[in-house]
Image (cartoon, helix red, strand yellow):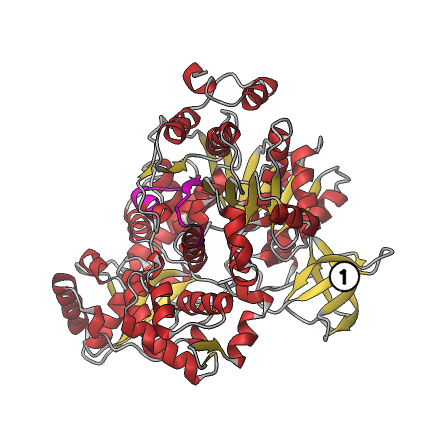
């Protein structure tokens, strides 16, 4: 153990280390302590799951707080999930019990009495979410200065989860607004398990502070991992005994790799989580086994999710939890033996996060990928018969395990939906402002550094016209439509939340909340939730309640997937490399090797006569162009081809930009000539003709002038620099 750092920790922390039998401080903990003790810099800690990052941040920060107590909240801990806050609360409460440093949870489900105590006597550690901070600024702004008047540290957990999206930009905006109210910039500490190039994340973390950000370089031990990929051909469209047997083999394998293990079974959709857990429970019951299978996703009630977390951490018998991204982050689940994934993670970052959930304390990580594919689908164009998510999974494994690569962060330049949100939030907090003062307040926030005064003027004009703002004697006021937005609880979040019905069980003495669903199922309907089948007893549409009773069997449920994922250029290039080579990857089992061989043969046969570009004639007037660019590059190529007079549409496999289908009567030569010109000369994306209905994510897009949304689309969704990488 590094005596130099250890001896600088507060006595209660040294006692904690002794009680927990730590043999040594980890490299990242020593490096972090030196930065926190000896500098005033911001700090970004990035290393694998269970590498001690949380302790690396808190132990020296708490020591400084113990040595010099603050006159307000001293440490502000921000998490993307309430569950992560609750998890960290238990760990901190034990650590700080003897130091008399209070820890207070502050989110929608937290104790109101604890919040009131903190407001009366601000001190210690406060744990919260971006949305709760937003609520404070709007509805309790007079208390903000008192709460944070002597704030020393802001610790942001799971930094990678906040980057690349409006929620992360909202957090930066809120923190900068708090800084203005208290008159100084507390130090920021960011924690993340999955970052590639750390330069952009370091800039993100320090935005609006003017401070330097240190990213300690520590000797990271190479991750040992056992990875397996298995492929199951099934025949869902043929309702006979053979097809049922094929599907049963798929679920039997899922049972085989989860049976007797403490593990997480990840899926990319809530519906698939429910389906998997239901089938595994049935198999376990049939075998009279003691296996415990639970479900965990955002539509399951917090109480049941917390039950699943505690069960998998503390149970003596093996427990398998089917989950979506809700268990991808750093909630402490103890020592997991294995991770199983149905299908492909959405990103390399997601793969790394999930892989890191097992293999703690020096043991190898275990991750099993399981694919199923309906081979009974009618014949189609060759590229629609290729399992692109299967190829992308192989690419993700190779990129990280061989090259240590993770997607770099992308910081949006023109977040107009957030611009609306923060404008209305500032107006709600102030009541009345002149347009000039409002512009000064908003446009000087770092996240809006690329938004011009003219853009903001256009937004204000739109908001005045549609009743979100109105003119008063002394300046701008919130209008009636704006009041309806700001006073809605949903306003605090910058991500869309669909209208959902609470599902309440009537089997017990009280109507226990099971979770939520989007569909108002009628009386007698059956659906799945929390790994259990339910039948609707009654429906209260006005109160948005569905009352259910538990039934036997397996039922289905569907949720609307939201959000966009963007595939990076390097992932697409790795997929092409996989198609071009004959390498026999050791992590593929025989079924997966056979499918990869079939896919390669299908690809090569189709492109056998192609020249330097991957352009396949589908008819005399339709051609498939395979650029192998990232999502933003592919979209730029789409508009570049349209500018040259071609009909063109992108074909996506799920969200993977596979090809552009080009329609023209000018022939193959004209298509190839256009591609050569685009690759050599590039394209001017600002000259593209963007349709009015261009798709762009943003919760408040309905309130943004269309001209601004098109401008944002061009700036943040098209990458013409990638065109030089066109195949």
Locate the C terminus by quadrant: bottom left
Q: Is residue 161 left or right of residue 301?
A: left
Name the residue nearer the viewer: 430 or 601. Answer: 430
Q: Which residues are magenta?
A: 181-202
Name the residue nearer the viewer: 422 or 257. Answer: 422
Query: Furthest-front residue in view?
Result: 474
Residue under the point 54% across and 70% down: 486
Q: Is residue 556 visible?
A: no
Q: Position of residue 104 (x, y in %)?
A: 61, 43
Q: Is residue 131 above or below residue 36?
A: below
Please give the residue where the numbered disc 1 appears in the rendered image.
Answer: 504
Q: Position of residue 405 (x, y in %)?
A: 33, 41
- Name which quarter of the figure residue 314 lies in: top right
Q: Secondary structure at mark 1?
A: strand
Residue under the point 83% across and 60% down: 506
- Name which quarter of the figure residue 653 lies in: bottom left
Q: Position of residue 606 (x, y in %)?
A: 30, 61
Q: Position of residue 228 (x, y in %)?
A: 48, 38
């Amino acid at each position: 153990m590094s005596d130099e750092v250890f001896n600088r920790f507060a006595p209660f922390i040294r006692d904690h280390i002794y009680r927990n039998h730590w043999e040594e401080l980890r490299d990242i903990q020593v490096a972090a302590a030196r930065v926190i003790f000896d500098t005033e810099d911001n700090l970004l800690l990035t290393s694998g799951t269970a590498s001690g990052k949380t302790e690396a941040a808190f132990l020296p920060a708490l020591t400084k707080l113990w040595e010099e107590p603050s006159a307000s909240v001293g440490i502000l801990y921000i998490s993307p999930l309430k569950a992560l806050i609750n998890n960290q609360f238990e760990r901190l409460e034990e650590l700080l019990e003897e130091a008399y440093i209070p820890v207070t949870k502050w989110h929608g489900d937290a104790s109101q009495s604890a919040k009131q105590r903190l407001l009366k006597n601000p001190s210690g550690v406060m744990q919260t979410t971006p949305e709760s901070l937003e609520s404070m600024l709007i509805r309790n702004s007079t208390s903000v200065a008192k709460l944070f008047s002597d704030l020393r540290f802001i610790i942001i957990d799971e930094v990678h989860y906040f980057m690349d999206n409006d929620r992360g930009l909202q957090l930066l905006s809120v923190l900068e607004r708090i800084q203005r109210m208290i008159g100084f910039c507390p130090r920021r500490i960011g924690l993340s398990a999955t970052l590639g190039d750390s330069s952009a994340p370091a800039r993100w973390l320090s935005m609006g502070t003017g401070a330097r950000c240190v990213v300690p370089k520590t000797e990271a031990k190479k991750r040992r991992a056992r990875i397996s990929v298995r492929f199951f051909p099934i025949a869902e469209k043929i309702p006979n005994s053979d097809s049922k047997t094929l599907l049963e083999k798929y679920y039997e394998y899922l049972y085989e790799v989860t049976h007797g293990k403490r593990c997480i079974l990840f899926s990319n959709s809530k519906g698939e989580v429910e389906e998997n857990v239901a089938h595994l429970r049935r198999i376990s019951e049939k075998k009279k086994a003691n296996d415990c299978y639970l479900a965990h996703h955002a539509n399951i009630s917090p109480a049941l999710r917390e039950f699943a977390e505690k069960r998998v951490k503390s149970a003596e018998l093996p427990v398998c939890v089917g989950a979506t991204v809700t268990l991808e982050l750093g909630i402490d689940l103890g020592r997991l033996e294995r991770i199983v994934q149905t299908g492909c993670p959405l990103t390399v970052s997601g793969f790394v996060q999930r892989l890191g959930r097992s293999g703690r304390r020096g043991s190898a990580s275990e991750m099993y990928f399981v694919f199923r594919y309906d081979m009974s689908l009618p014949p189609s164009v060759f590229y629609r018969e290729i399992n692109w998510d299967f190829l992308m999974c192989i690419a993700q494994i190779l990129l990280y395990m061989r090259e240590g690569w993770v997607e770099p962060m992308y910081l949006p330049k023109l977040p107009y939906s957030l611009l609306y949100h923060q404008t209305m939030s500032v107006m709600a907090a102030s009541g009345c402002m002149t347009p000039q003062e409002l512009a000064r307040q908003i446009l000087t926030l770092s996240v809006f550094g690329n938004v011009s005064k003219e853009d903001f003027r256009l937004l204000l004009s739109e908001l005045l016209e549609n009743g979100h703002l109105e003119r008063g004697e002394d300046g701008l006021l919130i209008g009636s439509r704006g009041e309806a937005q700001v006073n809605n609880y949903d306003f605090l979040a910058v991500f869309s939340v669909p209208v959902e019905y609470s599902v309440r069980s009537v089997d017990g003495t009280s109507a226990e909340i099971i979770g939520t669903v989007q569909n108002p199922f009628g009386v007698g309907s059956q659906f799945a939730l929390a790994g259990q089948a339910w039948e609707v007893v009654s429906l209260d549409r006005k109160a948005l309640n569905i009352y259910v009773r538990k039934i036997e069997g397996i039922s289905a449920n569907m949720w609307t997937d939201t959000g966009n994922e963007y595939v990076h250029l390097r992932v697409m290039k790795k997929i092409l490399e996989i198609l071009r080579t004959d390498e026999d990857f050791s992590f593929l089992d025989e079924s997966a090797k056979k499918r990869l061989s079939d896919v390669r043969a299908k690809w090569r046969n189709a492109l056998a006569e192609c020249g330097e570009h991957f352009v396949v004639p589908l008819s005399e007037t339709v051609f498939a162009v395979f650029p192998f660019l990232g999502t933003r590059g592919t979209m730029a190529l789409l508009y570049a081809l349209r500018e040259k007079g071609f009909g063109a549409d992108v074909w996506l496999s799920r969200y993977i930009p596979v090809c552009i289908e080009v329609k023209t009567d000018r022939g193959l030569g004209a298509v190839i000539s256009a591609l050569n010109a685009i690759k050599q000369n590039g394209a001017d994306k600002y000259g593209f003709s963007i349709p009015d209905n261009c798709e762009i994510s943003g919760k408040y897009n309905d309130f943004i002038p269309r001209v601004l949304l098109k401008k944002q689309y061009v700036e943040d969704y098209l990458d013409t620099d990638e065109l030089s990488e066109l195949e």
